[in-house]
Image (cartoon, rainbow, N blue to C red):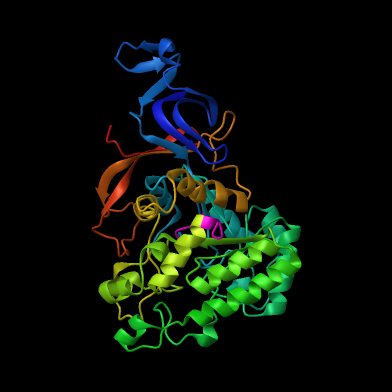
Amino acid sequence: MLLLENGYLIDPASCTEGYRDILIDGDRIARIMPRGTMRSEVTKCAGGAETAGNAKIIDLNGQYVVPGLVDVHVHFRDPGFTYKEDIYTGARAAARGGFTSVVLMANTKPAVDNTETLRYVIDKGAETGIHVYTCAGVTKGLGGRELTDMETLSAQGAVGFTDDGIPLTDEKLLREALRRAAACHRPISLHEEDPALIVNNGVHAGRAAAYFGIGGSPREAEISMVERDLRIAVEEEADLSIQHISTREAVELVRRAKKKSAHIFAEATPHHFTLTEEAVIEHGTLAKMNPPLREEADRLAIIEGLKDGTIDMIATDHAPHSAEEKAKPLTEAPSGIIGLETSLSLGIRELVGKGYLTMAELIGKMSLAPAKLYHLDAGYLAEGGPADLAVFDPHGEWVADGFASKASNSPFVGDTMPGVVSYTICGGRVVYDGTGS
């Protein structure tokens, strides 16, 4: 057993906040008690370690205790691209960032479009200490032409479907995919960029593209796809998530669609609510991503969408690449940045610290809301519930460097960040200890 004493609990599911002691027995939370109520049961062991019965005690000294964070948009590059990341190193990065559950994307090599690859990912993920889930592809080989066996993949453990990184341009195919996914009670998550409108991806077709003398990716590439796909999802009454939203127009389209249907969801990345295209001019390929960083008005619209509930969740789109790949010229380097280890800190700095969200609202968007979309038993703290927790000091600071990920492709390297994760506990076990004890 494990007793966490003197922590400030935030549970977004019950809207509970306050100082609590939490007793963990096995992989479940046994009791949640007012602070200090277990003190009479504490005894001293011969070695000086404190116990309550046979429970090990950790005094949290007022640090925040929240549900283990849930990231439903990550790339661990395994199988096929393990020089960038693998399931083990990705899971370590997740744990360091306070995440106890992650949902992997299907764009591996081979793609997760068959049961053999699906089982490889799930089985390897089970060895990591955190909960590693995965989506399967919507289409075979992520080719956009033929649907996968969604029913079998769902039965074998796929928690959702996505061709992330590749938009579904065939409207008829998408409609059929939404119907079949709905029958499996699984969401479809879509990467919304019309390739026909993009000259050079990863850079906004605005000031940044002009600075580098390239075509870039116009906002219309996202807007047109979002508008079409929301219409279809509303008609089919199927769960649809708009991934890594980047334009103010797309935020408004989601806002309107949500008034028509409870099946519409959207996610935002920390980099899209923190940075603009100016970061590409400053950091080059380290700020190149799909969809690209856009204008200040877009960044503020994303924040407003997070505030009013239009955007349900924060997801990192953790996308590791090697230093050699990111050292290539801008038009040749791959898009994407890592994000698991900086996500909580950026949320604290950019959203809570600037008054846009409360800490409870931030934690809800990083735990409960994503867990609900993918039907995961996560994102809440309750007696009898999963013993998946993150403990962090919101006032502590750390420098973004020395990542647990294999990769370091991030424009935030070197930044001093608020919010130091002390412990990540998954299934009742400490899977990350940042205290050095």
> Would you identify the image quadrant in which residue 116 lies?
bottom right
Q: Residue at x 39, y 51 (%)?
A: 355
x, y percent for residue 434: 31, 39
> Would you identify the image quadrant in which residue 356 lies?
bottom left
Q: How many labels were placed on the picture?
A: 0
Viewer-nearest residue: 426 or 78: 426
Is 167 located above or below residue 396 in the figure?
Answer: below
Q: Is residue 18 left or right of residue 333?
A: right
| Quadrant of the image containing the C terminus | top left
x, y percent for residue 366: 48, 50
Residue 315 magenta: yes
Residue 372 magenta: no
x, y percent for residue 368: 55, 46
Is 230 located above or below residue 19 in the figure?
Answer: below
Q: Main secondary structure of the magenta part?
A: loop
Q: Residue at x 34, y 52 (%)?
A: 349
Per the rendered image, the range of residues in magenta is 308-316
Q: Is residue 225 left or right of residue 416?
A: right
Is 237 located above or below residue 87 in the figure?
Answer: below
Q: Is residue 15 visible?
A: yes
Q: Residue at x 55, y 39 (%)?
A: 380
x, y percent for residue 49: 32, 17
Q: Is residue 331 visible?
A: no
Q: Residue at x 73, y 57 (%)?
A: 184
